[in-house]
Image (cartoon, coloured by chain):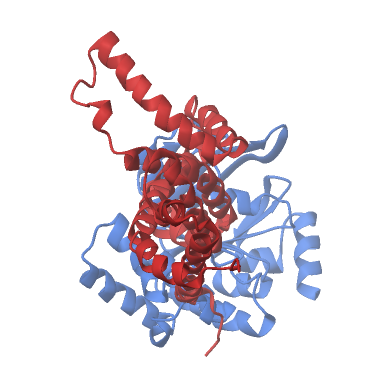
Chain colours: A blue, B red
Amino acid sequence: MIQLQQIHKYYGSQHVLKGIDLTVGKGEVVAILGPSGSGKSTLLRSINFLERATSGSITINGRTVDAASASKQDVLALRLSTGMVFQQYHLFKNLKVLQNVMLGLTDVKKLSPAKAKEISTVLLEKVGLKDRMNHYPSQLSGGQQQRVGIARALALNPEVLLFDEPTSSLDPELVDEVLSVIKQVASEGNTMIIVTHELGFAREVADRVVFMEDGIVVEEGTAEQMFTNPLKERTRQFLSKALRA
Amino acid sequence: MEKLLDIDYLIKSYPHILKYLPVTIWISVASMVLGIAIGLATALIRLYKVPVLGPLSALYVSFVRGTPLLVQIYLVFYGIPKFIYYFQTQHGWMTGIDVNYVSPEVYVLLSFSFNLGAYLSETIRSAIESVDRGQFEAADAIGLSRTQTMLKIILPQALTVALPNLGNTFISTIKDTSLVFVIGVIDIMGEAKIIGARGLAYFEVFIAVSLIYWPVCIIIERVLVIVEKRIRKYERSAIS
């Protein structure tokens, strides 16, 4: 289970997250929607301390970390219990696909190379790229790179997977292959938080939908309820406009 | 009739000068290696804005870039023995060293790596800064430490960026070693001067020495092109 409590984030005097509370149960898939600049990516990135929240606490798997006073060990613990998939993939350019997936296992978890390779090969097979294992990222399409990114995030067997607009940089015809991998990962019982603009996909894959704007959670509910019968007018506006587009 | 060029002397002197090529190469390679180490340390100090050391590094780089290498060689050659002597007589330190028996090659190595360290720190710093921020974030996200991130991800990528500059600096260094004779180290240039003086045939020996530097630099340039291709192979984009 993952719980965020009263997450605040300031950039200078700009208040971008205004006390966010969010609880995600084990195996739950939560989609965070909202217009650009609503703070949804910042929220996601504050979970694994790529951004340090100004205040608030993050609890994953019973370990509560206070954002303001987190130690190096706290941060590392959070990073090991989260897997991140980036909008721009951010695969390690100097490493081959297999090494990209293995690196966290060999260098952070200190598994033997043989064991790490075994785990990584299984994951690459799952995302359909076992035959690309000895390619460099530059030799793959965007969709393939993102699937490697997902395998890399899964490698550390995290408590929760964080997706930061995983399909926003992809050519339209490559979006589906990535979405279907994410769906498959979701169906295997992984806990996931997905920041996305793909509303149809959010509706299909998410158990719960959180709508954010201006650094606050405007409304949250089950995917079904949010898309068919949102309570707030602003949610209705956003979802209907975006669905029509 | 006075000859324009004593070809015989040129040809005869060439192998004698060539015998000292290992000295030139050895000094260049060793100071390059030390220079890269100093340059990397300096670059990291400046990138991480280490207190005290940061401003000192900036001063160091500024001084080296603002004074001629020849002056730096003299400063090291005349300055360091004075310092050692001072510490020996005033504080009783470093008494194991006899300054009269320190090989001038030591001073050459010190001054060259001191000089190279400053130039290379700028090369290395800009190369590290050119690596995409996302690479650091991805490394953070999987829990790599700062050192692991540097060694496994950032430096290998920075090396590719820095390589052409490192190559140019190495070629410059080969040529700069022609200064070392001023403090008594005999390299190809030093030997050329000695033989030139012996036969009063300076023009001939300097042509000979040019015909050593030039091909050596051409060969290094070729090798660098091959190395660069190798090391850049991960950037080659070919969707197959």
- Give the quarter of the figure containing the N terminus of chain B: bottom right
**Count of residue discs:** 0
In this rendering, the answer to whether A1 lies above or below B205 is above
Horizontal side of B125 relative to B195 (left or right) equals right
Q: Nearer the viewer, residue A166 or A228?
A: A166
Q: Nearer the viewer, residue A59 or B39?
A: B39
Looking at this view, name the residue that lies furthest to the left: B96
In this rendering, the answer to whether A71 lies above or below B188 is above
Rendering coords of residue A87 (x, y %): 60, 65
Residue B47 visible in this rendered orientation of the protein: yes
Looking at this view, name the residue that lies furthest to the top: B90
Residue drawn 42% across and 70% down?
A95
Residue drawn 42% across and 75% down?
A97
Residue drawn 38% across and 41% down?
B184
Q: Nearer the viewer, residue B89 or B1?
A: B1
Horizontal side of A232 relative to B228 (left or right) equals right
Rendering coords of residue A103 (x, y %): 35, 64
Q: Quadrant of residue A231?
A: bottom right
Residue B144 visible in this rendered orientation of the protein: no
Looking at this view, name the residue that lies furthest to the front: B1
Rendering coords of residue B64 (x, y %): 55, 36
In this rendering, the answer to whether B20 lies above or below A176 is above
